[in-house]
Amino acid sequence: LTGVTKFGKVSVFSDLNNLNDISMWNKYIDICGVSEQELYDNLDAELHEFANVQGVTYEEICVRLKEMYDGYHFTHNSKGMYNPFSLLLAFDRNEFKSYWFETGTPTYLVELLKKHHYDLHRMAHEETDEQVLNSIDSESTNPIPVIYQSGYLTIKGYDEEFGIYRLGFPNREVEEGFIRFLLPYYANVDKVESPFEIQKFVREVRAGDYESFFRRLQSFFSDIPYELARELELHYQNVLYIVCKLVGFYVKAEYHTSEGRVDMVLQTDKFIYIMEFKLNGTAEEALQQINDKHYSRPFETDSRKLFKIGVNFSAETRNIEKWLVEN
């Protein structure tokens, strides 16, 4: 039997309880995917053809395929596996697209994340043990087992001493597709318009137009759904994380969070943005922290124009109240 997620054991006398679960057995890790060696051994001609169509070198097409479709690990210390569905369609069409992600929408998983007020920033480096990883319980407050079993997360590392698995997105297809899908569920943006909003964010960052960037960000926080407004700090952090991740597929982005604050660094060819976000503080305090903590020190010898931006998010208005810029 194979499936998307596990089924709970039904009865102590059920024959299904006697099945061997091979999900994390090392000798079966390559039955559901394509290894890198299999790719090179069997699809060499197709790799050259793909590279020619894309106008890149053989080495470059291999790197891009690995970034997009590789990265699945079904147990610790195992080799990475390519998603065969996406890989073969990419070769068939000689085009990079989110083939697997487009076969279904993870609406149920998003609702789980919202229901349990999950901190999205944790998803890229979640830690758990094998018992949790293999569990499925509709009453559980932990959405990670279902998300892992559905293929949106995979094993990235393992602490043998404590038996702890580190999880993360397997590849760019899944990470970008999932984060893009999240945006309309957390921000005030239409599903159809969502890709265009990110495109506008990226253009504004590249152009040095921080005023338009923050006005657009303000619109994302308007009309916050009630179930999200109850966890206001987590909600504003989640929206900022989604925006940072999506913009980060096109410009260099870093995101850090701690109690009551978020700091974000965006870098383009011409500009560097150091942003400090406060909750129920002041934009002046946020800007002062950038200077007091010397956040700009790593960029002192950089020739790009640098913007220090202090931002305050108000719980009363449930939106960005003010931003101050120093350059």
Image (cartoon, rainbow, N blue to C red):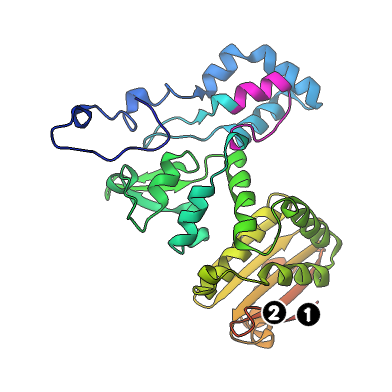
Occupied quadrant, residue 272: bottom right
Q: Give how far across and how far down residue 318 sits, in percent.
A: 62, 78
Q: Which label lies toward us, 1 or 2?
A: 2
Q: Label 2 amino acid?
A: Gly
Q: Nearer the viewer, residue 111 or 120?
A: 111
Question: Is 281 rendered above or below residue 75?
Answer: below
Q: Give how far across and how far down residue 58 sits, in percent.
A: 72, 23
Residue drawn at 80 percent across, 63 percent down? 271
Q: Label 1 amino acid?
A: Glu
Q: Are marks 1 and 2 in contact (CB under 8 Å)?
A: yes
Q: Which residue is mark 1?
A: 326
Q: Quadrant of the N terminus?
A: top left
Q: Give how far across and how far down residue 39 sits, in percent.
A: 57, 19
Q: Which residue is mark 2?
A: 310
What secondary structure is marked by label 1?
Answer: strand
All told, the count of numbered labels is 2
Range of magenta residues:
86-101
Farthest residue, direction left: 13
Q: Nearer the viewer, residue 325 or 144?
A: 144
